[in-house]
Image (cartoon, rainbow, N blue to C red):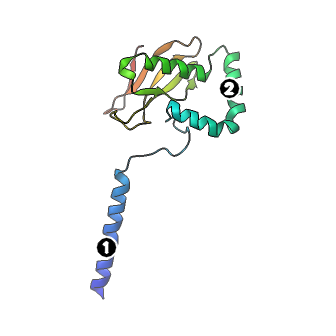
Amino acid sequence: MNTVLIIVIVVVLVAGAASAGYFLIQPAKNSSMNVTNNTTANDTAVNNTTSNASSSSGNQQQNQTDQNRGLISAAEAQAIANNYLNSHSKYVNFDAGVASLHGTVYFVPMVINNDNAQSAKGTVVGNVKIDGNNGAVLGIQTWDIETNAEINEPP
């Protein structure tokens, strides 16, 4: 009887360890909409059609507030960042994500747009910084892979 109990416990432990290992090696997926700005331009269109009903008035109010302060809108910042990324050959694997305003600077996520890049499609690898006052590209913000230190590159 003790032998059977020990065998059952060992089997349960091995199965638990195997399932935990399986889940740990799986890539992380973002199943929530726009929580981490981990979206591509195409995903944004899908997300906008599903979430615009609830956030449309909030976005309009935010854009009106930004325009009252003399700032460009988040959509304009995203378009400027997308044009910037498309006009530089070293950024061809990136799309502009949803812009977020920090002070007077928009941070627009650089999102990987294909499966041939080093990181997974949809991964945010940096930000394009856009001046909210005049729409000028201030540069690119990325992070060192080993130290996670911020790297700021001029435009």
SS category of the residue bearing label 2: helix
At a point 70% along the width and 27% down the height, the residue shown is: 60
Up-down relation of residue 84 to residue 18 (above or below): above
| Residue at x-position 38% and y-position 55% | 23
At x 40%, y 20%, the residue is 152
Q: Callout 2: 10 Å neighbours few (<14), some, many (20+)?
A: some
Marks 2/1: CA–CA distance: 57 Å
Residue beneath label 2, please? 62
Residue 59 horizontal/vertical position (percent): 67, 29
74 left or right of 12? Answer: right
Instruction: Find out whether the residues at labels 2 and 1 contact each other: C-beta distance under 8 Å.
Output: no
Where residue 54 sits, quadrant-wise, is: top right
**Residue 48, quarter of picture:** top right
Query: Tag 1's secondary structure?
Result: helix
Residue 113 vs residue 101, the one in the foreground: 113
- The three-letter code of the residue at mark 1 reads Val
Residue 136's spot in the image, x, y percent? 52, 12
Residue wearing tag 1 = 11
Q: Is residue 145 left or right of residue 78?
A: left
Rendering coords of residue 67 (x, y %): 68, 17
